[in-house]
Image (cartoon, rainbow, N blue to C red):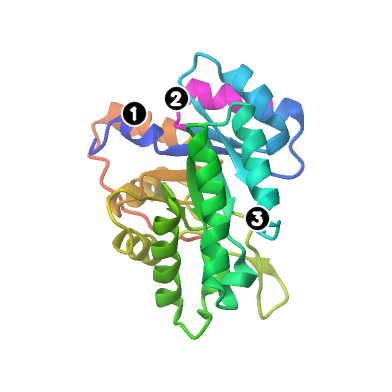
Amino acid sequence: MKYSYSDLAKMIDHSLLHPTMTDADLKAGCELAAKYQVASVCIKPYAVKQAVEWLRGSGVLVGCVIGFPHGNSTTESKRYETELACKDGANEIDMVINLGKALGGDFDYVEADVKAVCDEAHQHGAKVKVIFENDYLTAGGAGLSSDDFKRKLCELCERAGADWVKTSTGYGFVKQADGSYNYKGATEHDLALMRASCSPKVQVKAAGGVRDLDGLIKVRDLGGSRCGATATAAMMDDYRKRAAAGESGESSGKIGSGGY
């Protein structure tokens, strides 16, 4: 295989964020994450302390979402939510930018918002992933094209101290012409753009649209180091099946198909 099991498993942030998930669902998700030896779980703020206990000794980190999923909390709320999560044992923070402020061109606000979370997290030894929600940015904003807008966000996030820039929440549903709601999530174009728009010290995370092993491999090929996923078991079971059959592990699929 092109990449080892650990190379790919340690890219996965196993997502435990669906609004209907019960405590039993969250525990089962943590157990699955430990079984497959992924990088982390990404869990709801109230469950961080319990997840730390469930995962103790497993080598799997605990990540927590902040200002999720729409990024509209005040900066102080995001900072305090980060403080609480870190005190409960979170190793990583996935925060959402204030999209309205960004689209309105108030980039100083957005940068200060991100910096407040990064500064708080870093005081506790935690790292920060900053979510853009690219499905909402397809028309650009603040007089910038979509690509230039995303480049601008990458630049300000790096200045603010972000450890990762991240494509999506997985819940950025956009109303379509037929009245339905869906999203693309991570796309190959956006991952390549975001990787090229940051220095090597800032990593890139994909979320949304990565639903199988080929998609996960493609994220790594494009320079992504983490990937939000709910299809963890299917991905890594497929890896073991292919490795046993002596396959090369070259990616033949695409990402950005919606859902994760």
Mark 2 nearby-residue class (10 Å; few <14, some 14–19, many ≥20) = some
- Labels 3 and 2: the sequence-earlier one: 2
Q: CA distance from mark 1 to mark 2?
A: 8 Å
Residue 75's disc number: 3
- Residue 96, how many percent across, how many down? 59, 55
Tag 2, which secondary structure?
Answer: loop
Mark 1 touches mark 2? (CB < 8 Å): yes
- Residues drawn in magenta: 27-39
Q: Residue at x 62, y 18 (%)?
A: 54
Q: Amino acid at mark 3?
A: Thr
Count neighbours of disc 1 (C-alpha within 10 A) and say few if under 14, some if 14 to 19, many if 20 or more.
few
- Which residue corresponds to the image point at 57% horizontal and 50% vertical from the top-left? 95
**Depicted 119 relative to depicted 154: above or below:** above
Whether residue 165 appears in this view of the structure is yes
Q: Tell me residue 12's x, y (percent).
A: 45, 38
Q: Which residue is mark 2?
A: 37
Element at label 1: helix
Q: Amino acid at mark 1?
A: Ser
- Residue 237 x, y percent position in the rendering: 44, 30
Instruction: Answer yes or no: is residue 68 visible.
Output: no
Q: In the image, what residue occupies the spot 65% across and 76% down?
A: 176
Disc 3 to disc 2, how far (Cα)? 34 Å
**Quarter assignment of residue 212:** top left
Residue 65's label in the rendered image is none
